[in-house]
Structure formats: C-alpha cells, structure tokens
Amino acid sequence: MSASQEPTLSTEPAAPAEETSSEARNTATASPIPSIPCEVVRYPFAAVMALSTYFAYHVSLQGVANASYELHAADDEAAKVEAKYFLKFHPSIEVWQGARWIARFTQEPGWVKGH
C-alpha cells in the first residue's frame, strides 16, 4: 500500500470460513490426540469458580486456634475430607465456612503420626 492510499473499512460482514467436519480435521492433521467437543473446553474454569472457601483450624484444648489452613472445596463433605489431612500434624482440627461451624476431627487413640 502506498503512502497516498488510505485503508478503507468495510461495513459488509465477513464471509463465513469454509467449515469442515471434525472427522475431516482429525484425519487431515493426523494428530494422536483425540478431538474434544468445544462444549467441554469452552469454560475450563467453571468448576473452579464453583468452589467455596473453608478454613481448617488446629484448636487447642483451651480453645485457642494455633494454626489455620485455607481450603477450597465444592461442598461441606469435600472440605471435611481435605481437613482430615491435617490430622497428620495436629491432634484436632475444626472446619469452618465463615462463621458457620462444619465439623471437628480428632486423632484416634493409638494413632501414630505419619501413618
């Protein structure tokens, strides 16, 4: 384009691209990876956005929180499962979602750390 020519903007809609079937695309590329329908990958973070924030606290016998852990879980049951992991490090754990108490877990008698 020379300096004297100015670009023009077209108000006409662009012509649609020639569509090919997914089978034709797969065979043309010969990719070992199977194609995934667009509906599956359109919103890859949708599941992450649905997670709620919970907190797991190590609470002493005096009721003092000595440690806290932020958890992200889909529901109360999933938060409980995640919180039980911290029993490896503390004798008791409480799970909260904001001001709502969910559960308290304690180590079983005879429980050995690391097992």
Image (cartoon, rainbow, N blue to C red):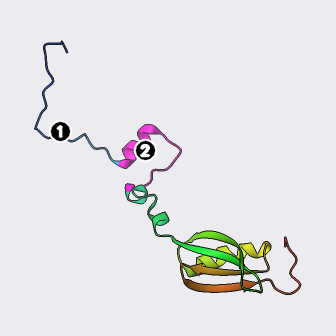
Where does residue 86 sit, x and y in percent of width and height? 73, 73
In magenta, the rendered stretch is 22-38
Q: Residue at x 52, y 47 (%)?
A: 33
Where does residue 52 sit, x and y in percent of width and height? 51, 72
- Secondary structure under tag 2 reads helix
Q: Residue at x 86, y 81 (%)?
A: 111
Quarter holding the N terminus is: top left
Q: Nearer the viewer, mark 1 or mark 2?
A: 1
Q: 42 left or right of 12?
A: right
Where does residue 19 sit, x and y in percent of width and height? 28, 44
Quarter holding the C terminus is: bottom right
Q: 81 left or right of 1?
A: right
- Secondary structure under tag 1 reads loop
Question: Magenta stretch containing residue 35, yes or no?
Answer: yes
Residue denoted by label 2: 26
Q: Amino acid at mark 2?
A: Asn
Distance (Cα) linking label 1 and label 2: 26 Å
The answer to which of 57 and 12 lies nearer the viewer is 57
Residue denoted by label 1: 14
Q: In the displayed structure, would residue 100 be above or below residue 50?
A: below
Where does residue 38 sit, x and y in percent of width and height? 38, 55
